[in-house]
Image: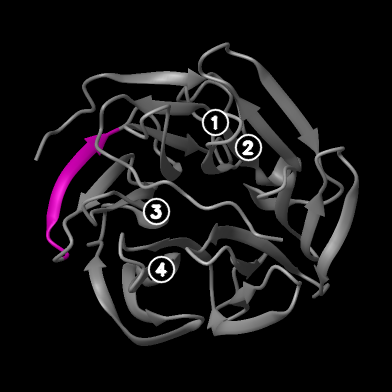
């Protein structure tokens, strides 16, 4: 296991309050990420340095590319769509007072798996749902506290998931839209931070950002700890492979709870070039 992240660089210097959800948009060759509490969807093109900002009407937990262009977004009151022309429409609207959308991921079949959580992080106040391209919603997990990292194994037969306060990454068996056999995949011991966003690489390794742990860890497919990358920010939030060959690991981070002079890089997007080989991520089919 290597210690500090050699080759770790700042991809996008920012002061995001709650930077989250890095996603490589293969069609546009750019990184998409969100600042949840600032209601902003950011993009960054590593080849040109070009950045864009989309201000959403509500707190935005995640933003993913759509197959036909535009974005699908996990907002406070449900899941919405931005067209390639920037026009907005609701796909699933389900406002629950005190609750918002959090992390989301696109499954191999093109559906969106979207999580929610309560603002006060009340135990069991969130859910994980599958949103089909036509907008039909199936609740996968009720009684979640802080729905976070979601990822699938390279063969699509396993799904990894983190309900952050449990200090675990769990794994499920997947058959279509059905998930069964929930069991612990990895446990994060006290003092090492809490599991936040995650991604799966081409070898089936699971990378997870550790909130308040100042690190990203890679777990081998058997659940053993394989690698620790120490970061210059205490609150990394999520990680994803990107770049033209999907070999660069992007890590978002948060400033929330920090004073202005603390951790100057907090809220930025970091990148570890050549970290591994990522998996191509599908776009949302709706």
Outermost residue to the left: 1
Residue at image location 62% in from the left, 32% down from the top = 16
Task: Answer left or right for 73 relative to 220.
Answer: right
Outermost residue to the front: 68
Q: Earlier in the sequence, mark 1 or mark 3?
A: 3
Q: Is residue 229 magenta?
A: yes
Tell me whether circle 1 and circle 3 mark residues in contact (CB < 8 Å): no
Residue 188 x, y percent position in the rendering: 25, 61
Residue 152 x, y percent position in the rendering: 38, 64
Q: CA distance from mark 3 to mark 2?
A: 19 Å
Residue at image location 62% in from the left, 78% down from the top = 125
Task: Answer left or right for 64 relative to 239.
Answer: right
Q: Nearer the viewer, mark 3 or mark 2?
A: 3
> What residue is shown with label 1?
267
Please give the range of residues in magenta.
223-230
> What residue is shown with label 2?
17
Q: Which mark is residue 161?
A: 4
Residue 128 x, y percent position in the rendering: 57, 75
Q: Quadrant of residue 134?
A: bottom right
Q: Earlier in the sequence, mark 1 or mark 2?
A: 2
Tell me whether circle 1 and circle 2 mark residues in contact (CB < 8 Å): yes
> What residue is shown with label 3?
198
Within 10 Å of disc 4 (Cα), the crowding (few <14, some 14-19, many 20+) is: many
């Amino acid at each position: 296991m290597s210690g500090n992240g050699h080759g770790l660089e700042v991809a996008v210097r920012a002061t995001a309050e709650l930077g989250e959800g890095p996603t490589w948009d293969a069609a546009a060759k750019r990184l998409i990420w969100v600042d949840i509490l600032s209601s902003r969807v950011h993009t960054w093109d590593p080849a040109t340095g070009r950045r864009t900002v989309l201000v959403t009407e509500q707190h935005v937990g995640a933003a993913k590319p759509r197959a036909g262009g535009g974005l699908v977004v996990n907002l406070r009151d449900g899941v919405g769509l931005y067209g390639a022309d920037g026009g907005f429409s609701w796909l699933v609207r389900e406002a629950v007072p005190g609750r918002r959308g959090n992390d989301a991921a696109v499954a191999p079949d093109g559906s969106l798996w979207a999580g929610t959580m309560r603002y006060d992080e009340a135990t069991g106040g969130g859910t994980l749902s599958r949103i089909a391209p036509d907008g039909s919603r199936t609740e996968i997990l009720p009684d979640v506290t802080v729905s976070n990292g979601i990822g699938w194994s390279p063969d699509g037969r396993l799904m990894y998931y983190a309900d952050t306060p449990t200090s675990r990454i769990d794994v499920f068996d997947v058959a279509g839209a059905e998930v069964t056999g929930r069991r612990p995949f990895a446990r994060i011991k006290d003092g090492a931070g809490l599991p936040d966003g995650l991604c799966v690489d081409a070898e089936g390794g699971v990378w997870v950002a550790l909130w308040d742990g100042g690190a990203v860890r890679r777990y081998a497919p058997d659940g053993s700890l394989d690698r620790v990358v120490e970061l210059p920010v205490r609150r990394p939030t999520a990680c994803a492979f990107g770049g033209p060959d999907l070999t660069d690991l992007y890590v978002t981070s948060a400033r929330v709870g920090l004073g202005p002079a603390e951790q100057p890089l907090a809220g930025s997007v970091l990148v570890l070039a050549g970290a591994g080989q990522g998996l191509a991520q599908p776009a949302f089919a709706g």
